[in-house]
C-alpha cells in the first residue's frame, strides 16, 4: 500500500473516531442540559460560593479553549503521518481530550454546584476514555513498538510535567487549528444557555425539581 493510500486510510479512521466521539458527547451534553434545566443551585445567588462557581466554570472553559488550540498547533497536519510526542504530547497522550474534560467540568461549575462540576468532569472523562481505547489500538497498529513505549512512559490524561520536551519547529495546518479553536468555542455556548434556563425558571416556565449542592 502506498504512503498516499495509508494517509487516506488513516484519515478515514480518524474521521470515524471523531464521529463516534461527537455523537457520544452530544448525547452527554443533551442529558446535562436536561439536568440543568430542572435544577437549581443550593447556594443563594448573592453568596460567595455562587460567584466562585461562576468564575471557576468560566476559567475552566477558557482553559479548555486555549489548551485545545495550543495542542492543535502540535498535532494538526502531523497526526496522520507520524507519532507526535513533543510539546503537550510529551507530558500526556491526549491533551486535546484533557482540556475538553476541563471544559465539561466548567459547564458543570456554571450550574453553581459542586455535584454538577464533578458529574461534568466524570462524564467527560468517561466519554474520552472510551474514545481513547479505539484510538490507542489503531495507533499501536500504525506505529508499533515506538507507540508501545510511548504508552508505557506517558500518562493518558493527567500531565506529568517532568516529561516535558519541545521542538524548535512546527508544521502547522492553519485550517485545522482554526477548526479546533472554533469547535472549542462551542463550550462557551453553555454560558447563555444556562442563563436562559435560569431566566425561564424565574418566570415559572421551567420547573425546579431539585436543588443541588
Image (tube, helix red, strand yellow):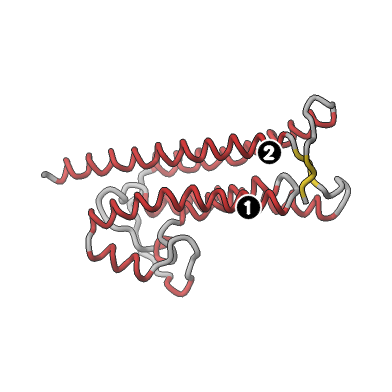
Q: Nearer the viewer, residue 38 or 95?
A: 38
Which residue corresponds to the image point at 40% horizontal and 52% vertical from the top-left?
132
Label 2 packing within 10 angstroms: few (<14), some (14-19), many (20+): some
Image height check: is 206 above or below 187? above
Q: CA distance from mark 2 to mark 1?
A: 20 Å
Q: Name the element at disc 1.
A: helix
Which residue corresponds to the image point at 81% horizontal and 50% vertical from the top-left?
50
Image height check: is 90 above or below 23? below
Which disc number belongs to residue 35?
2
| Residue with the mark numbered 1 | 60
Q: 192 left or right of 176?
A: right
Farthest front residue in view: 209
Q: Could you tell me residue 82's position as x and y percent? A: 26, 55
Give the tally of numbered discs.
Answer: 2
Q: 68 left or right of 174?
A: right
Instruction: Give the foreground label among 2 and 1.
Output: 2
Farthest bottom residue in view: 162
- Would you say residue 133 is visible in this rendering? yes
Q: Name the element at disc 2.
A: helix
Q: Could you tell me residue 15's position as x and y percent? A: 34, 38
Q: Nearer the viewer, residue 146 or 55?
A: 146
Q: Could you tell me residue 7's position as x and y percent? A: 22, 44
User: Are circles 2 and 1 on residues that touch, CB within 8 Å?
Assistant: no
Which residue corresponds to the image point at 54% horizontal and 49% vertical from the top-left?
124
Quarter-of-image position of residue 140: bottom left
Q: Nearer the viewer, residue 58 or 207?
A: 207
Q: 131 left or right of 50?
A: left
Q: Could you tell me residue 128's position as x and y percent? A: 47, 50
Q: Earlier in the sequence, mark 2 or mark 1?
A: 2
- Would you say residue 63 is visible in this rendering? no
Which disc number belongs to residue 82?
none
Image height check: is 182 above or below 172? above
Amino acid at each position: 500500500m502506498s504512503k498516499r493510500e495509508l494517509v487516506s486510510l488513516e484519515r478515514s479512521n480518524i474521521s470515524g473516531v471523531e464521529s463516534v466521539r461527537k455523537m457520544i458527547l452530544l448525547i452527554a451534553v443533551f442529558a446535562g442540559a436536561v439536568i440543568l434545566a430542572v435544577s437549581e443551585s443550593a447556594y443563594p445567588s448573592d453568596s460567595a460560593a455562587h460567584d466562585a462557581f461562576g468564575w471557576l466554570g468560566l476559567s475552566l472553559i477558557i482553559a479548555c479553549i486555549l489548551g485545545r488550540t495550543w495542542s492543535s498547533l502540535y498535532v494538526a497536519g502531523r497526526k496522520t503521518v507520524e507519532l507526535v510526542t513533543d510539546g503537550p504530547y510529551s507530558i500526556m497522550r491526549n491533551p486535546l481530550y484533557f482540556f475538553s474534560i476541563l471544559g465539561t467540568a466548567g459547564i458543570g461549575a456554571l450550574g453553581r454546584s459542586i455535584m454538577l462540576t464533578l458529574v461534568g468532569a466524570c462524564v467527560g472523562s468517561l466519554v474520552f476514555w472510551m474514545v481513547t481505547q479505539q484510538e490507542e489500538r489503531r495507533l499501536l497498529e500504525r506505529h508499533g513498538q515506538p507507540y508501545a513505549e510511548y504508552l508505557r512512559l506517558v500518562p493518558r490524561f493527567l500531565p506529568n510535567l517532568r516529561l516535558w520536551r519541545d521542538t524548535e519547529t512546527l508544521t502547522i495546518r492553519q485550517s485545522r487549528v482554526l477548526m479546533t479553536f472554533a469547535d472549542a468555542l462551542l463550550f462557551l455556548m453553555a454560558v447563555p444557555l444556562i442563563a436562559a434556563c435560569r431566566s425561564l425558571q424565574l418566570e415559572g416556565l421551567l420547573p425546579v425539581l431539585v436543588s443541588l449542592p
